[in-house]
Amino acid sequence: MRTGILVLVALGTLGVSARQAPLPPALREMADTERAFAARALAVGWKQSFLEFFSDAATGFGGQTGPAKALIRKAPDPPRDAQLLWEPRFGDIAASGELGWLTGPVTSINPARGNTPRYSNYSSVWKREGDAFKVVMDLGTDTPDFVPYAPGFTRAPASDRYTGDPAGATESLRAADAALNTALLTNQQAAYRGRMAEAARLHRSNLMPLIGETAALAWLATQKPHPTATTEFAEAARSADLGYAWGHTGKGFYTRVWSRGRSGDWKVALDVVVE
């Protein structure tokens, strides 16, 4: 999760990218909730804001997996004059409107470091609980520079969505995630080939995000097989067209968001590994 956060600053609501269709109301609500999350942190401090916007069921990663809120409570209090600025710039939501994901650039400014900015990229999975969205999964990856995005907020490609029988969706999602993990033990490039959605994002520590299968496969060709890769959890939306999974890989943790096409095949839309 976004550990080490000092003070959170909202950058303000941005419009939809000019070339795309209007966002589904649920996706717009989810993105606005992310912005409210940041604004609330500015008002009351990041710890209180995280406790308010994270689900009680959220999983955190901090040396080992555990309840996110427990890890938040244990984190050191931030200096008042430090800032962390972020905003949602890209993401998607299931057709059923209760499960989605967001990602965007982060800038950390801490006077104790001489005001030299540090950059990262956050990724969060949101789920509707009652009448509000809550964070259920959150991972960030350090980047060597500020991460650029298209102006405004862009929805991930959603023209080939699954509309079939939702029965067994979580089981089939877990099977897809486990199959990818098994393939990672042999060859990372081969494991992801054919399993990535259009405009899929690959996020790794100290690397700018890799967008699309071509860029991802080129980088994956330079990587060794994972010594271990284990699916620990998977959940699909009620509409069975989007879901997420998390688990352990190598020396760290991963979160994957999967989208499902009309053929019924699950494809990786977002893949984040923190080691």
Image (spheres, grey):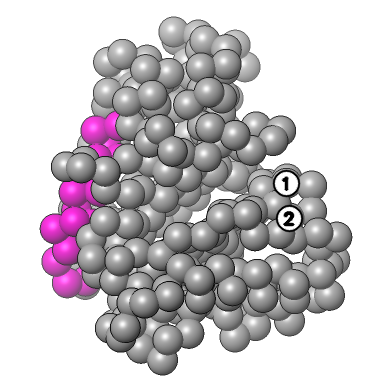
Q: Are marks 1 and 2 in contact (CB under 8 Å)?
A: yes
Q: Residues within 10 Å of mark 2 (few under 14, many from 20)?
A: many
- Could you tell me which residue is drawn at 85 percent across and 60 percent down? 227
**Residue behind mark 1:** 252
Horizontal side of 107 relative to 25 (left or right) equals right
- Could you tell me which residue is drawn at 58 percent across and 75 percent down? 176
Q: Quadrant of the C terminus?
A: top right
**Residue 240 at what x, y percent from top left?**
35, 73
Report the magenta residues as a range.
20-37
Q: Is residue 12 above or below residue 149?
A: above
**Residue 195 at what x, y percent from top left?**
58, 80
Q: Is residue 267 above or below residue 230?
A: below
Tell whether position 5 is magenta: no
* Amino acid carrying mark 1 in the image: Gly
**Residue 107 at what x, y percent from top left?**
48, 34
Residue 249: give its label: 2
- Could you tell me which residue is drawn at 51 percent across and 12 percent down? 78
Which element is circle 1 on? Answer: strand
